[in-house]
Image (cartoon, helix red, strand yellow):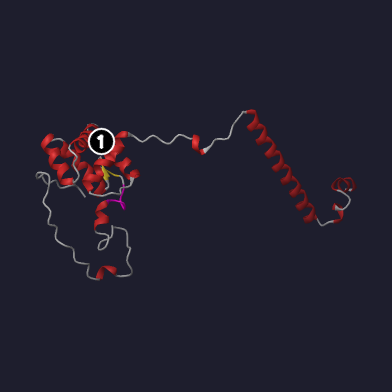
């Protein structure tokens, strides 16, 4: 016992047991921090590492197919702002389910650029006239953005454009953005659309629910 007290120092043995344990823990923590710092510096120096500047980190390379898809999507949806992350996921789902969609999106992009098409109606009419199969690609693009579905799988739900159109009157299922009994109030009037379809009629398909 006397030996243990002497090893703790002249003043330590007079302290309470709790104070002794706290003092020992503090010394151990300081030692561990010091050793960790020395070890990290030694490892850094041994590896010959040099600081990495933010300017030297290469920017991620965007898939040119996704870039073309986003350009065509801006035109077809008549929107200047679309989420690029959602676009990349939709494009991946479309191409995975139907590989020829990649070439068709490229054709839509080239058609839009060469003919300098601006509106969705112009692009849709020119595309169907140039190649009937491009109509299916346009359908997939529009279904992807407005329903959030690509390749028969749900890619996004809340961010689908169909909810953005009616966000002032209808909320997505499982979402209640209003107060209690908000559904009892009369929804705002919606103007009847006056536009005409740009594509030829397609067969009506009833999807399973």
Give x and y (percent) for residue 144: 25, 45
- Residue 157 belongs to magenta span: yes
Give x and y (percent) for residue 96: 28, 34
- Residue 96 belongs to magenta span: no
* Residue highlighted by disc 1: 97
Q: Name the image quarter holding residue 3.
A: top right
Q: Which residues are magenta?
A: 156-160
Give x and y (percent) for residue 164: 27, 56
In the displayed structure, 100 sits above or below 152; it is: above
Task: Report whether 195 appears left or right of 100.
Answer: left
Q: Name the image quarter holding residue 63.
A: top left
Q: Name the image quarter holding residue 134.
A: top left
Residue at 89% x, 47% y: name it.
6
What kind of secondary structure does the magenta stretch mostly adopt? loop
Residue nearest the viewer, comparing 4 with 33: 33
Give x and y (percent) for residue 158: 31, 53
SS assignment at label 1? helix
Residue at 14% x, 45% y: name it.
205
């Amino acid at each position: 016992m006397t030996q243990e007290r002497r090893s703790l120092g002249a003043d330590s043995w007079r302290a309470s047991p709790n104070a002794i344990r706290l003092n020992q823990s503090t010394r151990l923590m300081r030692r561990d921090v010091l050793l960790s710092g020395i070890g990290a510096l030694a490892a850094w120096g041994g590896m010959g590492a040099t600081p990495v500047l933010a300017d030297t980190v290469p920017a991620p390379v965007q898939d040119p197919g996704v870039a073309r898809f986003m350009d065509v999507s801006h035109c077809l949806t008549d929107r200047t702002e679309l989420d690029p992350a959602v676009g990349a996921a939709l494009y991946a789902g479309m191409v995975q389910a139907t590989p020829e969609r990649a070439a068709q999106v490229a054709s839509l992009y080239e058609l839009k650029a060469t003919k300098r098409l601006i509106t969705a109606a112009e692009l849709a009419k020119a595309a169907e006239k140039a190649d009937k199969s491009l109509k299916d690609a346009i359908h997939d693009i529009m279904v992807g953005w407005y329903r959030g579905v690509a390749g028969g799988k749900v890619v996004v739900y809340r961010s689908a454009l169909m909810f953005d159109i009616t966000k002032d009157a209808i909320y997505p299922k499982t979402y209640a953005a209003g107060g209690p009994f908000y559904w009892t109030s009369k929804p705002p009037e919606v103007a009847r659309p006056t536009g005409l379809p740009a594509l030829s009629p397609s067969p009506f398909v009833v999807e399973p629910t």
